[in-house]
Amino acid sequence: MSETTILIVPGLRDHVPDHWQTLLQAKLDNVRSVPPLEENKLSLAARVDAIQRELESISGPVILVAHSAGVLMVVHWAARHDRPIKGALLAAPPDLEASWPAGYPTPQSLQANGWDPLPGTPLPFPSIVAASSNDHLASLEAVTRMARNWGSELVNLGAVGHLNPAAGYGEWPQAEAFIRTLDR
């Protein structure tokens, strides 16, 4: 790879040992990750601030690699900050208007913590949205709408669930191909 730094932006579950983002960080050179929050875990403002702090410590080009709620964090970050970003891989964004299964935050708790409304303007950098046709946190239609609003290239991965260990993803080699595309 080039001198570009890859910044991993995990979702609300932060760093899961068998997650493709964690495995990617261990595999590639020049990769950093937004550290987990110790408190205020649902606070969008705290999550956006954590992304900004990590970016302030990186000089040179950056590619963001976000999964799930991490995608929403990146979109909110981009609406508030103007640091140049080389590109972003945005995998399996959840739909804030969907009914999520038990064990996930409620729409009301997310709204109370600043997640809604989700910015719907084009991102100021190239981006790839990797979507699933059977994600329990967002329909393909909802993700297609998000990608269109953000000016992102949409890639339908097929029936890959939420693209996490529960859906059988540990290793996800396609992420590296998407990163190489963004790094050109």
Image (cartoon, rainbow, N blue to C red):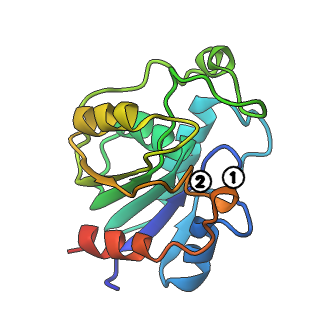
Image side of residue 36 versus residue 159, left or right: right
Up-down relation of residue 17 to residue 42 (above or below): below
What's the residue type where badge 1 is placed? Asp
Image side of residue 142 versus residue 50, left or right: left
Up-down relation of residue 27 to residue 8 (above or below): below
What's the residue type where badge 2 is placed? Pro
What is the x, y in percent for residue 122?
22, 36
Regarding residue 80, the answer to whether it shows in the image is no
Name the mark on residue 24: none
How many neighbours does mark 1 have within 10 angstroms: few (below 14), some (14-19), or many (20 or more)?
some
Q: In which quarter of the image is residue 180?
A: bottom left
Mark 2 lies on a secondary structure that is: loop
**Label 1, on which residue?**
14
Mark 1 lies on a secondary structure that is: loop
Q: Which residue is drawn at 67% across and 62% down?
A: 165
Up-down relation of residue 113 to residue 151 (above or below): above
The C terminus, quarter of image = bottom left
Residue nearer the viewer, 77 or 10? 10
Q: Residue at x 51, y 36 (%)?
A: 94
**Label 2, on which residue?**
10
Q: Which residue is drawn at 41% across and 58% down?
A: 64
Residue nearer the viewer, 94 or 136? 136
What is the x, y in percent for residue 113?
63, 21
